[in-house]
Amino acid sequence: MTNKLKVPEKKTPSKKATTSKKTVTSKKEPTAATSKTDKDAIKLLQDYIQKLLEDSKGIDILNIDLNGKTAIADSMFIVTGTSTRHVSSMAENLQEKLKETFGISCLLEGLGTADWVIVDAFDIIVHIFRPEIREIYNLEKLWGSDFSTANYTLYKR
């Protein structure tokens, strides 16, 4: 049985009478069903990004789970491109495909020099490096650490 990529439906705003007052809606607390659905959506997005990076001939693709390490994202991809043109091409392709398929407007940072481009897909962050720059920053060593065993006694009172 093969899993088909399910594209979320785009929500269209309902036509309500507009008033000058802004209404604030409260977010529901996550339930077990909601979090399972969210995890499935994140997994689907991760698989899609992995495939796009592979199709773009990305080198040494690494996916790091960020759960329990930070609240900024659920996972982080680190990938190497062969040149600045390759790095920028992968980033732009990723941005375009995520917009077309999922309706996600990704933010790109570093495209000007294309030594290190960050694609912010909100729940997933993709770092695309030239080989020399990836070696200098070594993000996989930083984020690949087991944070649960770190000694935080310096910050305890």
Image (cartoon, grey):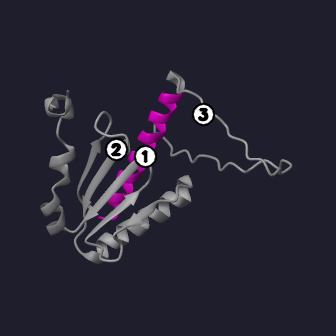
| Residue pointed to by mark 2 | 75
Quarter holding residue 82: bottom left
Q: Tell me what residue is drawn at x 57 percent, y 48 percent.
A: 7
Q: Which residue is mark 3?
A: 27
Q: Is 140 on the left or on the right of 39, as rendered?
A: left
Q: Quick one: label 1 or label 3, which is nearer the N terminus?
A: 3
In the image, residue 55 lies in the stretch drawn in magenta:
yes
Helix, strand or loop for disc 2:
strand
Which stretch did the figure color magenta?
A: 34-57
Q: Between residues 28 and 89, which one lies in front from this camera angle?
A: 28
Q: What amino acid is labelled 2 in the image?
A: Ser
Residue 123 position in % (x across, y down):
43, 46
Residue contact between numbered discs 1 and 3, judged by CB atoms under 8 Å: no
**Mark 1 highlights which residue?**
123
- Judged left or right of residue 98, residue 125 is left
Q: CA distance from mark 1 to mark 3?
A: 18 Å
